[in-house]
């Protein structure tokens, strides 16, 4: 579940938005399919991880940018990510200094 308070797993574990330190995505080749992992990192070092096989993944994917400021291209970055590529950080947004 995803709402204005944060993200909740199917087992009932909740992370509030204010406790998150980052959101990352990576993919693995599991031989018969490619799995996408969407990971919410907590300031304690704990994390919640959802795969594209989880029932709540699509709901989270569809509504994440309603609750967190993400780059316009975040969905395309996830869809185009290859299993052999390093994970990508969706949030916080990375800024480049000149």
Image (cartoon, rainbow, N blue to C red):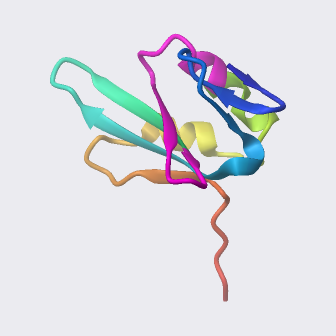
Q: Is residue 35 magenta?
A: no
Q: For the N terminus, which image quadrant? A: top right
State which quadrant residue 61 falls in: top right
In the image, residue 76 lies at what x, y percent?
Answer: 56, 39
Tell which residue pokes out farthest to the left in this image. Answer: 31
Image: magenta residue range? 41-60
Query: Residue at 59% of width from left, 48% of height from top?
Result: 42
Depth check: give the residue in front, 51 or 86. Answer: 51
Tell which residue pokes out farthest to the top in this image. Answer: 55
| Above or below, 98 relative to 71 | below
State which quadrant residue 63 falls in: top right
In the image, residue 83 lies at what x, y percent?
Answer: 29, 41
Query: Residue at 66% of width from left, 49% of height from top?
Result: 20
In the image, residue 85 lies at what x, y percent?
Answer: 32, 51
| Above or below, 45 relative to 63 | below
Q: For the C terminus, which image quadrant? A: bottom right
Tell which residue pokes out farthest to the right in this image. Answer: 4
């Amino acid at each position: 579940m995803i709402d204005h308070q944060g993200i909740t797993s199917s087992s009932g574990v909740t992370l509030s938005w204010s406790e998150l330190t980052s959101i990352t995505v990576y993919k693995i080749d599991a031989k018969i399919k490619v799995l996408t992992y969407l990971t919410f990192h907590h300031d304690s070092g704990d994390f919640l991880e959802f795969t594209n096989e989880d029932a709540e993944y699509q709901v989270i994917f569809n509504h994440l940018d309603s609750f967190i400021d993400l780059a316009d291209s975040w969905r395309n970055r996830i869809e185009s990510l290859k299993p052999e590529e390093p994970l990508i950080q969706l949030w916080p947004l990375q800024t480049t200094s000149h």
